[in-house]
Amino acid sequence: MNNYLDTTVDVYKQAALKPDVGLCCTTTPIWQLPELQIPKIMQEMNYGCGSTVHPRDLVNSPKVLYVGVGGGMEVLQFAYFSRQKGGVIGVDLVEEMLTACDKNLLQAEKENAWFQKEFVELRRGTALDLPVEESSIDVAAQNCLFNIFTKEDLKLALAEMYRVLKPFGRLVLSDPITENRMPDSLRNDSRLRALCLSGSLSMKEYLQMITDAGFGTVEVRAKRPYRILAPSQFDTEEMILLDSIEVCAIKDPMPADGPCIFTGKTAIYFGEEEYFDDQKGHVLMNNQPLAVCDKTANAFHILGRKDIYVSESTYFYDGGGCC
């Protein structure tokens, strides 16, 4: 096992044995859903930087895979939408974390009349070699785990997620990213990497690795400030800002002209006609906003029309639009 993975296992073994509330800091409020009570211990062991639970992904009792179970909070939330035996598979490499999660699920069963522990199946395994059958999962998710991996291992982890997803299945991710230069001294620090602080890629690199894995559509659903690596505290000459990003990647066919990546851009046509049709499948009704992927937004820019407004990225996309 790589040195940084050894360190990661040790960090999360200790976090399983003794909850570490400050280990991560989620930037997304915990879902408030009818009759869902999340045990306090699960909240204390919420070792993520955002949320991967989005109700619009979770229709028709999907088969869900969650990698890196932590205290079980998101596993429980996924089970809320997939109330069937083994509806949620939780995978973790750290035996102590699986034990803690199992114990916490028993507590959740006591606090939630609707929840049965059999809704969740816990398996020991690694994201680099998932103990899951090919094309068997509707929704796969990970929260602040892939950020720990080196680029080589991240490529393997994404390939594994792609393998186990059904056609048009969804991979939902939450990870820190940074647009600042990460010094090698920090990037190569195995403990800082395990703490999700120094493995961050730029957004462009992060999204490129996802599309290189074969995902034809990628949605950037949220981006928020997350952590600061300051020169007074870390081995860096300049302040490094980490953002928390939430992304959904869909296993649909790769378009001939490249992936559709939605970063929250909108196009509005305000010309003299009733609508504008680019003859490529995109119709803009007069003065009606349309969410567009970055590829389409760029094509509209190239047209140079004065009657089409294209917004900058908001890094918030919640469905609909051009593709």
Image (tube, rainbow, N blue to C red):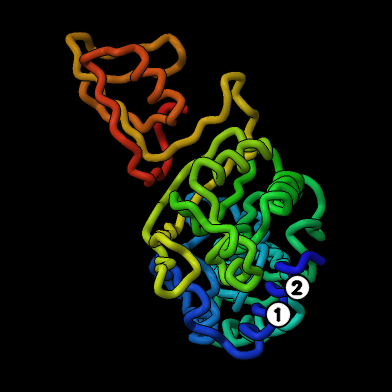
Q: Position of residue 1 (x, y in %)?
A: 82, 66
Give the Cα distance between marks 2 and 1. 6 Å
Up/down of 159 relative to 310, above or below: below
Up/down of 64 relative to 73, above or below: above
Amino acid tagged 2: Asp
Dot 2 crowding, Cα within 10 Å, few <14, some 14–19, many 20+: few
Q: Residue at x 59, y 58 (%)?
A: 184
Q: Residue at x 58, y 70 (%)?
A: 192
Q: Residue at x 54, y 73 (%)?
A: 47
Mark carried by residue 6: 2
Which of 156/91 is in front?
A: 156
Q: Residue furthest front?
A: 237
The residue that label 1 is drawn on is: 10
Left or right position of 277 against 51: left
Q: Residue at x 47, y 79 (%)?
A: 37
Q: Position of residue 11 (x, y in %)?
A: 65, 79
